[in-house]
Image: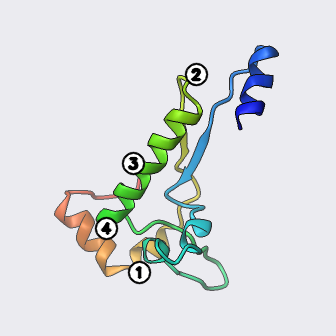
Amino acid sequence: MKSVIAAASLNAIQIVPEIDTPSHAHSWGLNPVWSDLVLKCTDDKGFDGQLDLSKDDVYTFTKEIIREFDEIFANSPYLHFGGDEIWEDCWDAQPQIQDFMKEHGINNYG
């Protein structure tokens, strides 16, 4: 990444790193240490790989990733989090997500 950032800088290009969450996190769940942080909601119309936002470890892990991105992309004033393409039916079907939302006064996914 250092060489890409350096080349971009030489060409007046600002790299904006992206951590695509809370969906598109399937690859995070492939690591056995973090596999319980990713929901599995497979059916013919859904997606695996949304983070289980009811788990404290999701926030610990995300903070660590942000810290690493801050080091790698120190010259970037931006960090993009994606935030799109949530499959609401997956979260709707998870009791722990629904409990989390009630506990925190969250009424919708928007």
Lower position in the chain sequence, tag 1 or tag 4: 4
Label annotation for residue 93: 1
- Disc 2 is placed on an element classified as loop
User: Are the residues flagged by discs 4 and 2 in contact, CB closer than 8 Å?
Assistant: no
Lower position in the chain sequence, tag 3 or tag 2: 3
Instruction: Please say if 10 is above or below 32.
Output: above
**Which class describes the residues within 10 Å of circle 1: few (<14), some (14-19), or many (20+)?**
few
User: Are the residues flagged by discs 3 and 2 in contact, CB closer than 8 Å?
Assistant: no
* Residue placed under numbered mark 3 in the picture: 63
User: Are the residues flagged by discs 4 and 3 in contact, CB closer than 8 Å?
Assistant: no
* x 54%, y 61%: residue: 23
Lower position in the chain sequence, tag 1 or tag 2: 2
Along the viewing direction, whichever of 40 and 32 lies nearer the viewer: 32
Relative image position of residue 8 (x, y in whole percent): 77, 23
Instruction: Specify the farthest residue to the bottom.
Output: 43
Instruction: Please say if 44 is above or below 85.
Output: below
Lower position in the chain sequence, tag 3 or tag 1: 3
- Disc 1 is placed on an element classified as loop
Q: How many numbered badges does the structure rendering display?
A: 4
Please name the amino acid that badge 3 sits on: Lys
* Residue placed under numbered mark 4 in the picture: 54
Q: Is residue 96 left or right of residue 52?
A: left
Please name the amino acid that badge 2 sits on: Asn
Q: Disc 1 and disc 2: Cα gap in Å?
A: 41 Å
Q: Is residue 10 left or right of residue 60?
A: right
Q: Disc 4 and disc 2: Cα gap in Å?
A: 32 Å
Q: Disc 1 and disc 4: Cα gap in Å?
A: 13 Å
Relative image position of residue 109 (x, y in whole percent): 40, 57
Relative image position of residue 16 (x, y in whole percent): 63, 31
* Residue placed under numbered mark 2 in the picture: 75
